[in-house]
Image (spheres, rainbow, N blue to C red):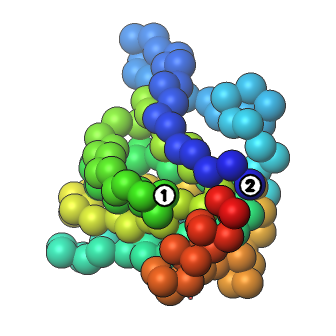
Amino acid sequence: MESNYKLVDFKTLGDDRGSLIAIEEGYNAPFDIKRVYYIFDTKQGVERGFHAHINLEQIAIVVKGSCTFVLDDGAQREDIKLTSPNQGLYIKGLIWREMKDFSPDCVLVVLASEHYDESDYIRDYDKFLKEVKNEED
Ligand code: TYD
Protein backbone atom coordinates (compact mmCIF):
# COMPACT_ATOMS: atom_id res chain seq x y z
CA MET A 1 0.00 0.00 0.00
CA GLU A 2 1.22 3.46 -0.80
CA SER A 3 1.85 5.49 2.37
CA ASN A 4 1.01 9.11 2.63
CA TYR A 5 -0.32 11.89 4.74
CA LYS A 6 -1.52 15.40 4.09
CA LEU A 7 -3.24 18.33 5.71
CA VAL A 8 -6.69 19.03 4.32
CA ASP A 9 -8.64 22.26 4.70
CA PHE A 10 -12.32 21.96 5.52
CA LYS A 11 -14.82 24.46 4.27
CA THR A 12 -16.27 26.39 7.18
CA LEU A 13 -19.95 27.13 6.97
CA GLY A 14 -20.42 30.19 9.08
CA ASP A 15 -22.95 32.88 9.75
CA ASP A 16 -23.53 35.37 12.52
CA ARG A 17 -24.32 32.51 14.93
CA GLY A 18 -20.87 30.96 14.55
CA SER A 19 -19.15 28.20 12.57
CA LEU A 20 -20.00 24.72 11.36
CA ILE A 21 -17.95 22.10 9.51
CA ALA A 22 -19.40 18.96 7.93
CA ILE A 23 -17.35 15.92 6.94
CA GLU A 24 -19.01 13.44 4.61
CA GLU A 25 -17.60 10.29 3.13
CA GLY A 26 -17.08 10.55 -0.60
CA TYR A 27 -16.87 14.35 -0.41
CA ASN A 28 -14.19 15.60 1.97
CA ALA A 29 -13.45 12.20 3.54
CA PRO A 30 -11.94 9.84 0.94
CA PHE A 31 -13.03 6.63 2.73
CA ASP A 32 -16.06 5.04 4.35
CA ILE A 33 -16.12 6.19 7.97
CA LYS A 34 -16.58 3.08 10.12
CA ARG A 35 -15.38 4.47 13.45
CA VAL A 36 -15.03 7.75 15.28
CA TYR A 37 -13.04 8.17 18.48
CA TYR A 38 -11.82 11.14 20.44
CA ILE A 39 -9.05 11.85 22.87
CA PHE A 40 -9.52 14.52 25.53
CA ASP A 41 -8.51 15.40 29.11
CA THR A 42 -4.96 14.38 28.17
CA LYS A 43 -2.63 14.91 31.11
CA GLN A 44 0.25 17.35 30.76
CA GLY A 45 3.39 15.87 29.22
CA VAL A 46 1.64 12.74 27.95
CA GLU A 47 2.76 11.27 24.62
CA ARG A 48 0.50 8.73 22.89
CA GLY A 49 0.37 6.67 19.76
CA PHE A 50 3.74 5.05 19.10
CA HIS A 51 2.32 2.74 16.48
CA ALA A 52 1.65 2.33 12.78
CA HIS A 53 -1.25 0.67 10.99
CA ILE A 54 -1.07 -1.94 8.26
CA ASN A 55 -4.37 -1.09 6.61
CA LEU A 56 -6.15 1.96 7.96
CA GLU A 57 -7.07 5.40 6.74
CA GLN A 58 -7.70 8.12 9.28
CA ILE A 59 -8.46 11.81 9.49
CA ALA A 60 -7.41 13.51 12.73
CA ILE A 61 -9.04 16.82 13.65
CA VAL A 62 -8.30 18.96 16.67
CA VAL A 63 -11.75 20.44 17.23
CA LYS A 64 -10.48 22.33 20.30
CA GLY A 65 -7.02 23.26 21.54
CA SER A 66 -3.87 21.95 19.92
CA CYS A 67 -1.52 18.98 19.74
CA THR A 68 1.40 17.82 17.63
CA PHE A 69 1.61 14.69 15.49
CA VAL A 70 5.02 13.25 14.78
CA LEU A 71 4.77 11.28 11.52
CA ASP A 72 7.50 8.95 10.39
CA ASP A 73 7.50 7.05 7.08
CA GLY A 74 10.62 5.07 7.96
CA ALA A 75 12.90 7.54 6.20
CA GLN A 76 11.87 10.92 7.61
CA ARG A 77 10.10 12.29 10.64
CA GLU A 78 7.92 15.38 10.51
CA ASP A 79 6.17 17.32 13.27
CA ILE A 80 2.72 18.58 12.35
CA LYS A 81 1.02 20.86 14.83
CA LEU A 82 -2.75 20.86 14.65
CA THR A 83 -4.27 24.06 15.97
CA SER A 84 -7.54 24.51 14.12
CA PRO A 85 -10.86 22.69 13.60
CA ASN A 86 -10.67 23.90 9.98
CA GLN A 87 -7.90 21.42 9.20
CA GLY A 88 -7.67 17.66 9.19
CA LEU A 89 -4.62 15.43 9.02
CA TYR A 90 -5.23 12.55 6.63
CA ILE A 91 -3.01 9.50 7.20
CA LYS A 92 -2.91 6.37 5.08
CA GLY A 93 -0.70 3.34 5.06
CA LEU A 94 2.50 2.53 6.87
CA ILE A 95 3.18 5.68 8.89
CA TRP A 96 4.54 5.58 12.42
CA ARG A 97 2.70 8.16 14.51
CA GLU A 98 3.23 9.76 17.87
CA MET A 99 1.15 12.51 19.46
CA LYS A 100 2.48 15.03 21.95
CA ASP A 101 2.15 18.58 23.31
CA PHE A 102 -1.57 18.28 24.01
CA SER A 103 -2.99 21.53 25.32
CA PRO A 104 -5.13 20.96 28.44
CA ASP A 105 -8.29 21.76 26.46
CA CYS A 106 -7.35 19.61 23.44
CA VAL A 107 -10.12 17.50 21.92
CA LEU A 108 -8.72 15.31 19.15
CA VAL A 109 -11.35 13.61 16.98
CA VAL A 110 -10.30 10.78 14.68
CA LEU A 111 -12.34 9.36 11.81
CA ALA A 112 -11.26 5.86 10.79
CA SER A 113 -11.92 3.63 7.79
CA GLU A 114 -12.10 0.39 9.82
CA HIS A 115 -13.43 -0.88 13.11
CA TYR A 116 -10.95 -1.18 15.96
CA ASP A 117 -8.69 -4.16 15.25
CA GLU A 118 -5.58 -4.74 17.36
CA SER A 119 -4.15 -7.04 14.66
CA ASP A 120 -3.87 -4.00 12.35
CA TYR A 121 -1.43 -2.29 14.75
CA ILE A 122 2.36 -2.36 14.60
CA ARG A 123 3.51 -1.26 18.04
CA ASP A 124 7.18 -2.12 17.69
CA TYR A 125 9.33 0.45 15.85
CA ASP A 126 11.85 -2.10 14.52
CA LYS A 127 9.00 -4.23 13.18
CA PHE A 128 7.59 -1.09 11.52
CA LEU A 129 10.93 -0.42 9.79
CA LYS A 130 11.01 -4.03 8.56
CA GLU A 131 7.48 -3.68 7.15
CA VAL A 132 8.49 -0.47 5.33
CA LYS A 133 11.48 -2.27 3.84
CA ASN A 134 9.30 -5.24 2.79
CA GLU A 135 6.96 -2.86 0.96
CA GLU A 136 9.86 -1.25 -0.85
CA ASP A 137 11.27 -4.60 -2.04
P1 TYD B 1 -4.17 3.23 22.39
O1 TYD B 1 -3.99 2.48 21.12
O2 TYD B 1 -3.19 3.02 23.49
O3 TYD B 1 -4.28 4.78 22.10
P2 TYD B 1 -3.18 5.74 21.42
O4 TYD B 1 -2.76 5.08 20.15
O5 TYD B 1 -3.91 7.02 21.19
O6 TYD B 1 -2.05 5.92 22.37
O7 TYD B 1 -5.64 2.91 22.92
C1 TYD B 1 -6.00 3.01 24.28
C2 TYD B 1 -7.00 1.91 24.62
O8 TYD B 1 -8.23 2.13 23.92
C3 TYD B 1 -6.50 0.55 24.22
O9 TYD B 1 -6.87 -0.36 25.25
C4 TYD B 1 -7.27 0.21 22.97
C5 TYD B 1 -8.56 0.99 23.14
N1 TYD B 1 -9.19 1.44 21.89
C6 TYD B 1 -10.42 0.93 21.52
O10 TYD B 1 -11.01 0.07 22.20
N2 TYD B 1 -11.00 1.39 20.39
C7 TYD B 1 -10.42 2.33 19.61
O11 TYD B 1 -10.99 2.71 18.57
C8 TYD B 1 -9.13 2.84 19.99
C9 TYD B 1 -8.42 3.86 19.14
C10 TYD B 1 -8.55 2.37 21.15
Left or right placement of residue 84 versus residue 110 in this view? left
Q: In this rendering, is residue 120 above or below 135?
A: below
Q: In this rendering, is residue 71 above or below 10?
A: below
Residue, x 77% and y 43% (percent of image)? 31
Front residue of 49/136: it is: 136
Screen quadrant of the C terminus? bottom right
Label 1 crowd bin: few (<14), some (14–19), many (20+), radius 10 Å: some
At label 2, the amino acid type is Met
The residue at which mark 1 appears reads as 73
Front residue of 71/136: it is: 136
The label on residue 28 is: none
The label on residue 1 is: 2
Image location of residue 96, percent across then percent down: 48, 66
Q: Mark 2 or mark 1, which has the lower sequence index?
A: 2
The residue furthest left is 45
Screen quadrant of the N terminus? bottom right
